[in-house]
Every structure is written in C-alpha cells, then in structure tokens.
Image: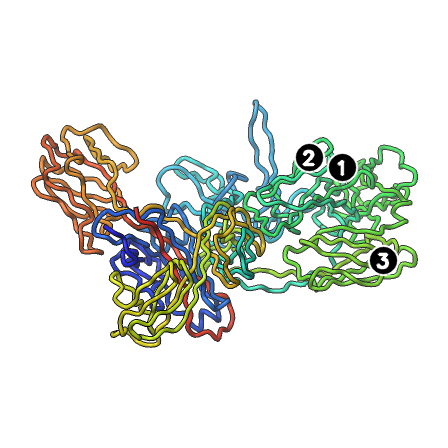
Amino acid sequence: MTISRADLKVFKPELLGSSNEAGGQRTKNAVQSGLLNELFSAISDIDHAQSSIDIVKAFPALDTPDTSTLIDAHVFISEPPIDPLVNVFMIESAALDDESRMTDMKEIIESSVTAGELIREGGPGFLVNQNSFSSDYLQSSYRFNDRDYWKTTYLQVGQVICITVEYPGIENVAWPRKTHFCKVTRTSIVNGAVGTVVFDPPIPFATPEPGLQINGQSKCTRLRLSNTASPLKFHGVTKLTAAASGVSLAVGATQLSLLPAITTLAPKPGNTITGGSDNGDATVSQVIRKVISQPSAEGTYSYSFTTADLLIDTDVVTAVSTDPFGVFGGNSSLVQSITVGTGNVTVTLRPDVRVAYNPTVSLYYVSAYKYSIYSSANAFPANKQLTVGSIKGRAVFADSNYVPQDVFENVYNGIGKLYDTTELLATIDYFTGVVTKQTVSRGDFELSYSGLVESTTAAAAGDTTAKFALSVANPLLESFYVQVERISDHAIISASSDNQGVITGSGISGTIVDGLVELVFTNPVDLTTLRYDITDQLRQLPPAEIYGLNPLRIPNDGIVDMFRRWGTVALSHTQVQQVTDSIGAVFTIRENAQFVDITDANGASLWTNNNDHFTVNKVAGTVTINSDFTGFAAPFVLSDTIMELGLVSSFSGNSLVLAKPLAREYPAGTTLASVQILGDLQARVGRVRDMTAWANNWDLDGDPATGNVNAVDYPFEVKNTTAVNEDWVLIMTSASAFRCVGRRLGQIATGDTLNDFSPINPLTNAPYFIIRSGAWGGGWQQGEAIRFATFAASNPIMLLRNVQVGHSQITTDKAVLSFFGNES
C-alpha cells in the first residue's frame, strides 16, 4: 500500500491537561493540522504574570489498515512561537512509554539528578522542617586490612545533597522510604573542628534516629551526595541569523531554558582576593594565590597545569589551606576534582558541565616562589614576615587540669592577636615572629605555632598586576568597581567596568573574561587592600510546589543544550503567497520544494490524495489550481517549504557546525530544529513462546509447555491503525479457555482455542490483535501460558511549553510540529 500524507497522523493521549492523570494510552483522536490549542491550552493572563509550564504527550503514528513500514520516522518543531516569552521543545527519554502519565513525565524530567555517593550511614534523626545538621555527620569510618579509617566529606555552598530513608524488605508505614533533595546554603566551622551545615528547603518529613531498627537494620537515615547524569535529549528550535550554504551556521541560540526563570540582582560589595583560614572566615587571611588559566574545549574534561612552584602544607600546620582549587567560567562548583602530580596539577570538570561558550579553566594555588612555611621551633628567617591570617598554634598549659588548646588569629579583633576558644592568649609580631603571652586565669602556658612567611622586601614593593576570579557565577559586568591602595603614597585608586568587561580608571586598566579579572596597575599597589564590588545575576527557578518540578533536580539551573554532537537537525524555510480560486491559474514556487500546501482562513489544508484542488510540479516549481475551493474560507495561502537534514559536528554559543555542506542556500530566518528520530514505524508481533506456568514474572520465561501454538502458519495479526506497545500473556484456565493479560493494561479479555480471538481496544474500538483459531494445537493444560509482545506503528513523544514572566502583545500564536518518514 502506498503511504500518503494523510496516513501520517499525530494522535492525542487519553487525557490532555495538567492533572496528574494526564497522558496515558494513544486514542484515535488525531490532532487537526492548522487548528489552535489542539495539544496545549491557550496561554492565560496568569501564565504571563506568574510564568507557566505545560507538558503534553502525543503519538506520531502511521495510520494504515495494514503493516506498511514508515522508515526512519522523525519529528521536529518546524516553526517556533512568535512570542519570545514562549518556548516549545521536545524531551526524549527511553523511560517514556504508552502508559506514562503526568507524574511519570515529571519524574522523567527530574531524572537527571538522583541520589549519589554515600556520605554517611546513620545520619541524625531529622525533625519535620529541620534545616541543619552538625558537620560531625560529614565524617564516616570504614575498615580496610583490619584497620579503621575516617573520611571527611567537605561540602560547598550551593551543592545539592540528599537525605534518604533506606532499609531492606517491606516498607514500614511509620518510616516510609523517602528522598529529600536540598541545597547547602551555609557551612560554619568553629576553630576547624565542629560546625553546622544549613540547607534549603527544610526537610518536610521526619527520619529515624540512628539506633532505630527497621526490618532488622539500624542507621536508616543516610546522607548522600547528588549525582548528575542526564539520560535525556532535548530537541529545540531556533533561527538562522545569517544566510548559510556551507557547514557553519550562525544561529540565535544553541541552548534553551527547561523551566521558566526570573533573574534578580544581588549586590556583593567589599570582596577581597585574599585566601581564607581554618576558622571559617574566607576574608581574614592576606594570602594571595597565584592564578594560571587555559581555555576549555568541548568534550575535554581534564586540564593539566604545570606547577613547579606549588606549595603544599602536607601536615596542615598553618591556618590557611594551601590545597590548589579550580574554577571553571568563574564557578568552582563545576570542578569535580583536583589531582596533584609531580610538578603538575590536573583540574577535572564535572561530567555534566557544558562548554558551549568555551569559558576559561583556572587553577588557584599558593606559590612557593612567594610563600614558605615557618614553624616557631626554628629560628625566624631574615628578611621575612609572617602573613596575616595564616598562623595556627597550640597552647599547652602548665596546669594539666586544662587541656591543650588550638590557637588562631582573630583579625576582626585586630591583627597580631592569638585566641583560643575562650580568650586572648598572646600577641605576635609579624616581622620578628616574637610572641608576647598574656596573663590568663588558667596560668602559664607554652605556645608553639606555624604560619606562612613571605619576603618583607617584596611585600613592601607591592604588585603591578593582579589576576583573580570574581566571587559570583553570573556577574553584571558594568557593576564591577575596584579600589586598591597605591604603595608610594597610600592613596586609594579605583576603576570600573563597562558591559563588555573593559576596565578603566585612575592608574588601573584591565578586562573581565568568563569571570576572570586581569588588572594592570600603573604604579605598584598593595593587593591585600584590594576591594571590589560586583552584582550577581541570580537565576531563580520556580519552587517545586508551583509546577511539581523540583528545581534542585534540574541540572545547570535549567539551561540545557537543544542540539548535540552526532544529532540530526532539520533546516526548513517556508515562503508564502496569497492565491485565488481561479481554476487553471498557475503560481510559481521554489523548485524542488519538499512540502507544498494551500490553507484557508481557518488553517484547513486543501491537499488531497487525488489533487482535487491543486497540482504540484516540484521540478518545474509550479502549482496549478484545479477547483474553486468550494467549502473553504478565503483568503487562501500557498506555502512552499525547502528543507534538508544535517548532522551536527559541533556547536557553541551562537554557532553550529554541520558534518557536510548544505545542498542549497538558506536565508536568514530559516528554522533550525533538533530532530527526534522515532525509528521505523510498523505494527508487528514479537517472538511467540510458551511455558509450563505463569508466575507473574514479566522478565523471565519458563520451561516450554506441553501444548503448542502455530504462529508460523497462522501468524498473530496486527494493524498499524490499532496495535499498541505491550507485553501479553495468555494464561490457560482449562484445556481450551484462557485469559489475556497485558503487562501495563492488566486483564483485557478472555477467550478460547475454538474461536478467533480479537480483544477490543476501547480507545480505538478495534482489536489489539487477532489470533486465528487454526493457530491452536492440542495438549494445553490449566496454568500453562503463551507470551508475546506487540509493537505499535507509533511512538510517544513528550512536548514541553514554558512561558516566561512578562507582558505580551501577541494574542494569536502557534508552534508547528512536523512529522516525516520514507516509504519502504
């Protein structure tokens, strides 16, 4: 049978809308081409005011009364909405099936972020709405070679963690298995020992105490890291911003926003470029790290830096961590690990990081050329000075009733002062290392310390350059303002940036690129006095309670790639002209246009299989009118679409590169869409097999039955119009009777071996399949079973529409879904 345009249909699911029950099986209700709101509902005033998310399911299908094959069926969005606040795209997932409902589709969208590596078993028994826990719970023990080892997990602000309730066996009603995703908002450490981890949102359920046993297991509350590994593919649409005929395409975008978002401005004044100390204050130390950088490359996740001057505080004797750390595009949370080698350091990015804009990878470390580690057990070195904020000491009291205490600087109370947890114990001279003890109630004590030292001469001379990463992930460049003290006269000089990241000012010039600041000073300055202001542009996703999607389970702040390497894209450009209903009139279109149609004022197509209303000559590039268009409403629009498919080689920012040149030139404004490939569409039956018993195990077959069924001479029959994707079992209830059960649909009918069996699909009013009576042999016994699967000539797809916050003057809009394939 010849497949025509009329045989390619997109069917609606059982239920459209936003309820949890929306979605479900394919119906025979086809989407009517040209009509508005066939899948998505109209956008309301509230949608524009608050933003909105709509998720729908549809079934592109080959709708023929036989088993014809549509080869390499594929769909794409051939025309995006006109309204820039509205975005429509497809989400491809292997987990989407015919039965999937709204709750399933939301879980699919959230599937990129899951519970990951275990931090600790036996977490605290959380209370409802608790939002913090002791950092003690970040320590865990393990045993190896008959020795106990302790491991500490260090969390960063902004990191997503999971609190879970886990145990084996039957679920406990009082303590159901649950997972809570939350973001670390603050970590505080008291003298490098014990602190608090604060998270948001608070946990909405209670969890069991470590000693409580569930099904024989204790320590059921667990802390886990989150794991990000997206199994999803996103298929979006954009426009060419310039004419294209080769492999390089200039496009409007290569990424899209999965969820609606709002941007708020958060000023962050008074930032420094100095390091932190063990007391948890990130601004008290005056250690300035060296920064080296290199550009990132798509597909590369590990970057090696030569660091012959790396200083490592192996025994952690100073208050400042000398561990190197990496920054990607101004964001340290995108770095997965740092590996220190001999003379080199490797920065490894997280696997979910996208380098579409090729930002910079930077390594920060303490340079041995500038600093060295000093211990008070040794003579103080000549021409050196201690670095403020790096001192860490130990006080041992003569009276053994008082336990030894760790000692740190507290710069907020003035530099050169050493405190324990109770009081001021001593002062220190940074230039000589001499400690002057205070008289304290606990009596005399001995104080030893270590710290970083640097050249007095070099510190006094100052610096003429500076390089550092901004303290925010999405800076508003024109808000950057820097001040620093000049060495020669202690005058404060300043500069600011424009919106392109060009920094100018009094005695200061520089640039901001990918969050990395590089400054040049006309005269030497004291970098420990440098302060800068910057405003962060915070991208905020809607809270989970609005749309039922947890923003913490949406990676990369909801920004996803709409294309992928080795993915297929479709370029299409449609040209329109108004035509009349004059029989015999000939209109010119572009030669070899892939799609030609005439539509009326209501969007109804005038195309028919028999060319009743018009005839197309694609080679000549003409359309001839054959009727007076009776039954249709004027005006009439003739559209011709040129189109071709291509393979993506690479993409970044506003450009995309194809593997092969285009076959023809496409003008600016051409639609470029990511293609979802559905595969060959044909109704068919899988392998038929029998077994001695049915144990309700869909994943395992049993031993062969004594009876037999002849599916070779009497093949099970399906049609493209009615077959569904389902696993079936026929369970014998006697020697001749059976019941039919679907894996997802449940029991649908009963039958016998004496008659043809054709169970009716209530959604299509036609048989799911037909088994002829001649297929049945004898010897069947009660309990034996026959298994087979049917495959539909359709595959479900998921579409998402989001509306960003804002006012729109557009009252009528649409997105066009195109469905293509080839005949066998």
Q: Amino acid under label 1?
A: Leu
Where 375 falls versus 51 (above or below)?
above
| Whether label 3 touches label 1, CB < 8 Å | no
Q: Amino acid under label 2?
A: Val
Query: Looking at the rendered structure, which numbered label has been put on residue 160?
Result: none
Classify mark 2: residues with Cα within 10 Å, few (<14), some (14-19) or many (20+).
some
Query: First in sequence: mark 3 or mark 2?
Result: 2
Asked where in the image residue 572 lies, by quadrant, the reply is bottom left
* Towards the viewer: 766 or 374: 766
| Residue that carries the numbered disc 1 in the rendered image | 310
* Residue located at (52% from left, 42% from top): 224
Where 643 falls versus 626 (above or below)?
above
* Towards the viewer: 172 or 822: 822
* Residue located at (57% from left, 33% from top): 141
Asked where in the image residue 728 lies, by quadrant, the reply is top left
Secondary structure of the residue carrying tag 3 is: strand
Query: First in sequence: mark 1 or mark 2?
Result: 1
Q: Position of residue 731 (x, y in %)?
A: 17, 38
| Whether label 3 touches label 2, CB < 8 Å | no
| Residue that carries the numbered disc 2 in the rendered image | 340
Query: Looking at the rendered structure, which numbered label has been put on residue 485?
Result: 3
